[in-house]
Image: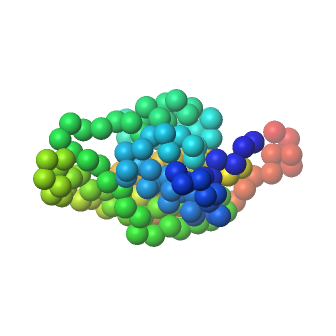
Amino acid sequence: MVDHREDPGGAAAESDDELVRQAVDALGREDPEAFAELVDPDVEIHTARGVRRGRDAAVEWASKRYDHLIRRWGVDEVRQFGHSLLVLGCVQYVWREDGEVGDETPTSIGFEVRDGSISALRIYESVQEGIDAFVASQTTPAVDHAEHGS
C-alpha cells in the first residue's frame, strides 16, 4: 500500500495526528484534490446523509460547496487511540461576499487510519456523540475470531 501522508507542499506526514490535521485543513481550504491524496482508495465517509465509499466518492463529497458560503473546518484538539482519532474543533460558515462568519458550530470528526491513509471518516452530529463513540472504541474489548471459531 502506498503511504498517502503528504501535504500539498510534498512533505510527508510524520504521524496519524498530522495526517488527520492535513485532511481537515484540505477540507477547510476547499481542496478536494489534496484531500484525495490523504485517503485510502477504499475510504468510507459517514455523514448524516449516508455513507460514501471509495476515493471518487470522497472527492465528490469534499467538492460540495455552497454558492454564498465557505465552509471552514478548524482543529482544536486531536485525541488518539491506536489508529482511531477524534478531531474536536469547529466548522464555520463564512459569507463569500464579505468574509463575515455567519455561523460557527462545534464539531467532532472520527478518523480511522490504515497504512498511512485515512480509511474512514465520520462526521458526528454533536461533539458529545463523537466523544462517546471514541471512548466506547477504547473500552470495547477486541474479539479474537480464531478463538471463537469464526
Task: Relative to 122, say whether 129 is above or below.
Answer: below
**Viewer-side residue, 80 vs 35:** 35
Asked if residue 76 lies left or right of residue 53, the reply is: left
Q: Position of residue 115 (x, y in %)?
A: 71, 49
Q: Residue at x 49, y 30 (%)?
A: 57
Rendered residue at 38%/36% (across/down): 63
Q: How many marks?
A: 0
Can the viewer see residue 4? yes
Residue drawn 17% across and 55% down?
99
Q: Considering depth in this image, is 137 or 89 the residue closer to the camera? A: 89
Given residues 10 and 77, the one toward you in this image is: 10
Position above or below: 5 against 128: above
Determine if residue 110 is in view.
no
**How far across and down, in percent of the image, does residue 44 sit?**
55, 38
Q: Position of residue 37 (x, y in %)?
A: 57, 43
Instruction: Point out residue 45 in the picture as x, y percentages from the top left corner.
Output: 49, 40
The C terminus, quarter of image: top right
Please tell me which residue is depicted at 61% across the width and 58% down the height of the picture: 11
Where the N terminus falls, by quadrant? top right
